[in-house]
Image (cartoon, rainbow, N blue to C red):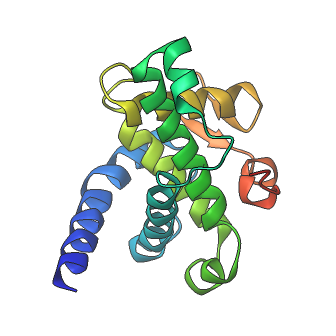
Amino acid sequence: ESTVLLFVNAYRDRFERISLPFAQPTLATQLQWAPDDLFKCVLLWFRGHDIAHNIRTTKTHWEIVERALGSEAVRVLGEVVADVFGYLLSGRGPITEEFILDHDALDYAFMAEMVHYLRRGPRWFADSAAAFLELSFLEQQGYVFIGADGKMTWRNDSFQLHRMRPSM
């Protein structure tokens, strides 16, 4: 049990000292939630992310992707799948109802984490490259907007991917 608390404390410290300070000047949406409420969103998303790394179906063929695109692409795409799965898992279901009352807070926390990973650039780390791909997709599809000042905003009515039905 103390190991779990250690990781929770480490994640909380990282979120409050790195993710939120990087997010606040980058995200146009003003911070309107208590850090604890946002952190609950992050913990639930992390849990779904970790679960996703272990999901395999009869249609999961990472070796085909690896042969076609290389091992780095497999790592990046694995992070993308885990991020999206974690986000979708965070946005629906009975566990979510216990943790998250405000889906706008989930979106803010997700964007804050994306900014956290993007700060390292998309080239050297699979999770940073995944954040770059995710943000690029969201921007190209009209979910996220990047202003001339570099600030990011999103449409709450469209960005909330948790409202979509997962097709997994």
Residue 75 appears in the rendering? yes
Answer left or right for 109 relative to 143.
Answer: left
Answer left or right for 109 relative to 16.
Answer: right
Task: Report the quarter where the N terminus lies.
Answer: bottom left
In the rendered image, residue 17, in percent from the top left (x then y), is placed at 24, 57
Residue 160 appears in the rendering? no
Q: How many numbered circles are shown?
A: 0
Residue at 21%, 65% (x, y): give it: 10
Residue at 53%, 67% (x, y): give it: 32
Residue at 28%, 50% (x, y): give it: 18
Toward the top, the furthest residue is 68
Q: Nearer the viewer, residue 18 or 86?
A: 86
Residue at 40%, 76% (x, y): give it: 36
Would you place residue 145 above or below residue 39 in this image?
A: above
In the rendered image, residue 142, in percent from the top left (x then y), is placed at 77, 32
Would you place residue 89 above or below residue 168 in this image?
A: below
Would you place residue 159 above or below residue 32 in this image?
A: above
In the rendered image, residue 137, in percent from the top left (x then y), is placed at 66, 29
Q: Nearer the viewer, residue 53 or 64?
A: 64
In the rendered image, residue 33, in percent from the top left (x then y), is placed at 51, 70
Answer left or right for 160 relative to 2.
Answer: right
Q: Nearer the viewer, residue 64 or 103?
A: 64
